[in-house]
Amino acid sequence: MTTGALLLVIGSAFIHATWNMAAKKASGGVIYVFFVGFMAATFWSPLGIWLLATGKAVDAGTSMAAALWATAMSSLLHALYFSALQKGYSIGDMSLVYPLARGTGPLLSTITAILLYGERPSLLALVGAVLIACGAVALTRPSHTPEVQPTTDADPAPDVVPARKVRRLDSAVTWGLITGVFIAGYTLWDKFALSVVGINPLFLEWGTTVGRAVALGPILAIAPASRSQLIPTFRAQWKPALTVAVLSPVSYMMALTALKSSPVSYVAPMREMSILIGTIFGARLLGEGDAQAKRLRAIAACAMALGVAALALG
């Protein structure tokens, strides 16, 4: 990776962790995802229109029809990603769901990039991918801090994990992994859209926000239950939605710009230094997890961060 691409990815990681904290606070569903897409499409519309007007939306010789088709597919993958992420945040802690999703996503991206694009990362880079995987596995372990229960001398409280806590953890882990799959999906597709189709990174990101709003808007308007929740949801969540609408495209535009000229197997894992940042945000700023869970998540996040460093150096 070039120095410029490296700086872009580092800046993207900090911004990414910041908007995810806003998303966690919102804990919204599909309606929230729609508002994020609508606000982002509106806020960034001057940039998108300027790119179209100046002919910079696509590379020379690229068909606009092909670019729009590729952007529509990217919009679908990003909509699924946002929906899965919000579902995970509604069930589990940010310091669990965020590193799990961000860790498994690039691991899948790296493996698939090797198979599809013929990329050949070094041995050190592959060791980094393994560290990321190990960190992700560590995050799936439940904390064994006993639950406080009324006891008698004859019947002490058992030092076991409550069943409902395990079920909730399993559900959060599942949605974290699903989110990771969608991260891998949109990363690989967007690499194709940038390098093969020839779409400008800035236009691709703006186009995906427009696509999410256009696709989800009619669906929410038709469903009576969703339609009745539009205004209450907007009133309750417009601030975090606006934060995500502004910061999320900035983060991904920076990553896409680096991806345009760098291999997926390096850019995708390098972005995941945000894992450590997001874990710190969740544990320290949001007060998530007991003492044992915080230690375990910190160790797992450090393993993932080391994995990212190995990928960058490799």
Image (tube, grey):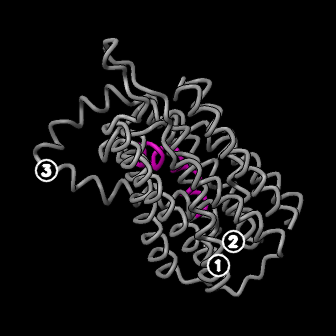
Q: Position of residue 160 (x, y in %)?
A: 41, 34
Identify the image quadrant of the C terminus: bottom right
In the rendered image, the residue lying farthest to the front is 154
Say what amino acid the circle numbered 1 marks: Ala
| Frontmost residue, 43 versus 273 | 273
Q: Residue at x 33, y 44 (%)?
A: 167
Magenta span main SS: helix
Q: Which residue is mark 3?
A: 223
Callout 2 environment at 10 Å: few (<14), some (14 to 19), or many (20+)?
many
Callout 3 environment at 10 Å: few (<14), some (14 to 19), or many (20+)?
few
Q: Which residue is mark 1?
A: 113
Q: Position of residue 112 (x, y in %)?
A: 60, 78
The Cα atoms of the two marked residues, 3 and 1, are separated by: 39 Å
Q: Earlier in the sequence, mark 3 or mark 2?
A: 3
Q: Quadrant of residue 27?
A: top left
The Cα atoms of the two marked residues, 3 and 2, are separated by: 39 Å
For this view, does 141 lie left or right of residue 73?
A: right
Q: Position of residue 217 (x, y in %)?
A: 27, 52
Q: Earlier in the sequence, mark 2 or mark 1?
A: 1
- Is label 3 in contact with label 1 (beta carbons under 8 Å)? no
**Residues rendered magenta in the picture:** 35-51
